[in-house]
Each structure stands twice: as C-alpha cells, then as structure tokens.
Amino acid sequence: AFDYSQIELRVAAFLSGDEKMIDIFKRGGDVHRAVAAEVFNVPPEMVDDEMRRRAKVINFGILYGMGVNALRQNLGTTREEAQSFYDEYFKNFSGLSRYMREVKADATRLGYTETIFGRRRFFEGLKSSLPFVRASAERMAFNAPIQGAEADIIKIAMARIDGYIKKEG
C-alpha cells in the first residue's frame, strides 16, 4: 500500500500559495493540529484530540465547500460557534480564502475550472438563476482543481509504482 499523506490539503496549499499552510507542511507538522491551534487560539501543544478532530472536519469541510450551516451540523455546535470557526480559519489562512474567491470568479466567467495538468470541468449551474443551484456549482467549481489535481497525481504515481514493481521484481 502506498499513500500520500493529506494530499488534498497539500494540493490546496500549493494551488493557493497560502504561506501559513505551506509552512506547516514544510516543517513536517500535523496540519489538523496546526489548524486547531490557529482556530482555537491555543499553542499546538495544548491541542487535544477533540480539537484536532474538529479541525479535521473544518479543513475538509472547507475544501468541499461546506458553508457555516453545514459546518455547524457536522461539528454539532451552534451557528455562532461555527461562524467563528469559519471566520477564524479564513483569517488565519487568507491565501486559501483568496484562492477560493479567485477560482469561483474565474469559473463563473469561463464556465469551467482547470487542473494543474490542464483537465477542464464545466459547470452549467454557475449561470443558473436559482441560488441553490448556483451555490452548489460554486462549491464544486472550487473543489474541482484540488480534487482533480489529486486524482491526476495519484494516477501518475500508480503508473510509476507499477513500473517500479515490475522492474524490481
């Protein structure tokens, strides 16, 4: 078995150029623990397992376009607390926030997003007059370059691993 640890968050850090997130990975840190420290305003050594679990929900929720209400539901908290986590996250990881806005704006203008390998995904819902259809398309559009790059990287790795295993017997 082979695995790329936290690949979606690594790809998000790379694509967004978020300096704080990139620094976490460069230092070999646990991104969920580091995010918990930022969001809960505590030193990393004070992050407990529950804080880390909640930070993981926040990390992946944001990558999948989860809004405040969905975050509230997934964390089992109040709307005010979920909003606070959401705001704190984007305050601390402003590069990711900027990247999200840029991807949504570009996707709305172009009608598609593109992976770093050039694969395009089109989103008809971005032009919808129905707010919930448009919001859903925006969430998918933001996530598509991240998930698409991850899928591309994994496929390339699988082909290389297969070649390596065959070569080495």
Image: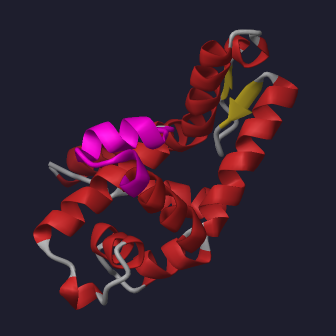
Residue that appears at 14% across and 64% down:
50
Report x, y in % for residue 27.
39, 86
Residue stretch rendered in magenta on the structure: 65-81
- Residue 97, visible in the rendered structure: yes
Side (left or right) of 118 relative to 93: right
Residue that appears at 57% across and 22% down:
136
In the image, residue 46 sits, relative to residue 49, either above or below, namely below
Q: Quadrant of residue 163?
A: top left
Foreground residue among 134 and 140: 134
Q: Is residue 73 found inside the magenta-colored segment of the image?
A: yes
Number of numbered discs overlaid on the protein picture? 0
Instruction: Give the image's coloring scheme.
Output: secondary structure
In the image, residue 122 sits, relative to residue 76, either above or below, namely above
Report x, y in % for residue 2.
21, 52
Side (left or right) of 162 relative to 169: right
Residue that appears at 20% across and 59% down:
53
| Identity of the residue furthest to the right in this view | 109
Residue that appears at 60% across and 77% down:
19
Q: Quadrant of residue 119?
A: top right
- Residue 150, visible in the rendered structure: no
Report x, y in % for residue 122.
69, 18
Magenta: main secondary structure equals helix
